[in-house]
Image (spheres, rainbow, N blue to C red):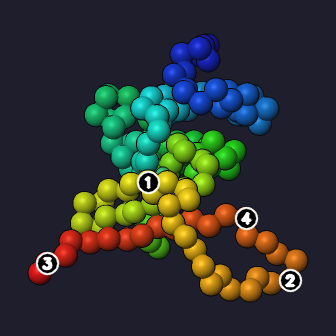
């Protein structure tokens, strides 16, 4: 039997959201959730969570890491950030903010919401409004 009090989740309402959604905490999912929320807030990839769990000798399947993370995205507990067509990160901060992605180091950093001004937005299709704008600025090393 898994004790939910074992989950060191910093965000208070995650437990409630998971309960309401009928999400079942199997031992594997609990281990994965612990790893994601142990150091909050943070950006991570499926691979880095998987590698970290292997390093800690935790027995989890890569598929379980994918499935659990995807479920958390679906429940809007974490957010997916696409940095390019082949790579996406996940973010434990779900409120709107922008990112800088350094292709040379693979590092994703936050840009606070409001520090980027967006102008000349296109006309939107009839009956549509902007739900959210997520900017990822890709940077690389610059040689003089
Ligand atoms: Zn972020």
Q: Is residue 71 visible?
A: no
Question: For the C terminus, which image quadrant?
Answer: bottom left
Disc 2 target residue: 126
Disc 1 target residue: 110
Give the mark, 4 or 1, whose residue is nearer the N terminus. 1
> CA gap, disc 1 to disc 3?
24 Å
Q: Secondary structure at mark 1?
A: strand
Q: Determine the residue positioned at 37% across, 34% down.
A: 53
Question: For the N terminus, which image quadrant?
Answer: top right
Mark 4 beta carbon near ligand 1 (under 8 Å): no
Q: Secondary structure at mark 2?
A: loop
Disc 4 target residue: 131
Q: Secondary structure at mark 3?
A: loop
Give the mark, 2 or 1, whose residue is nearer the N terminus. 1
* Residue ranking furthest to the left: 144
In screen coordinates, is 54 left or right of 28?
Answer: left
Frontmost residue, 136 versus 118: 118
In screen coordinates, is 123 left or right of 78?
Answer: right
Position of residue 84 measured from the top left corner of the image (x, y, whole percent): 44, 71
> CA gap, disc 2 to disc 1?
33 Å
Give the mark, 2 or 4, whose residue is nearer the N terminus. 2
Q: Determine the residue positioned at 73% across, 70% down.
A: 130
The quarter of the displayed image where residue 102 is located: bottom left
Give the mark, 2 or 3, whose residue is nearer the N terminus. 2
136 above or below 45? Answer: below
Q: Determine the residue positioned at 38% across, 56% down.
A: 108
Disc 3 target residue: 143
In screen coordinates, is 75 left or right of 52?
Answer: right
> CA gap, disc 4 to disc 1?
20 Å
Q: Is residue 9 visible?
A: yes
The quarter of the displayed image where residue 25 is located: top right
């Amino acid at each position: 039997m898994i004790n939910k009090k074992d989950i060191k989740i910093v965000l208070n309402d995650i437990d409630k959201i998971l309960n309401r959604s009928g999400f079942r905490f199997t031992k594997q999912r609990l281990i994965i959730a612990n790893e994601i929320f142990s150091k909050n807030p943070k950006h991570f990839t499926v691979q880095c969570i998987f590698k970290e769990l292997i390093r800690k000798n935790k027995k989890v399947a890569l598929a379980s890491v994918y499935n659990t993370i995807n479920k958390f995205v679906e429940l809007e507990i974490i957010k997916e950030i696409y940095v390019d067509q082949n790579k996406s990160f996940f973010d434990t901060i779900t409120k709107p903010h922008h990112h800088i992605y350094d292709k040379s180091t693979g590092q994703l950093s936050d840009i606070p919401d409001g520090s980027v001004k967006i102008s000349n937005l296109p006309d939107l299709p009839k009956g549509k409004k902007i739900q959210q704008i997520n900017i990822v600025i890709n940077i690389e090393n610059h040689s003089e």
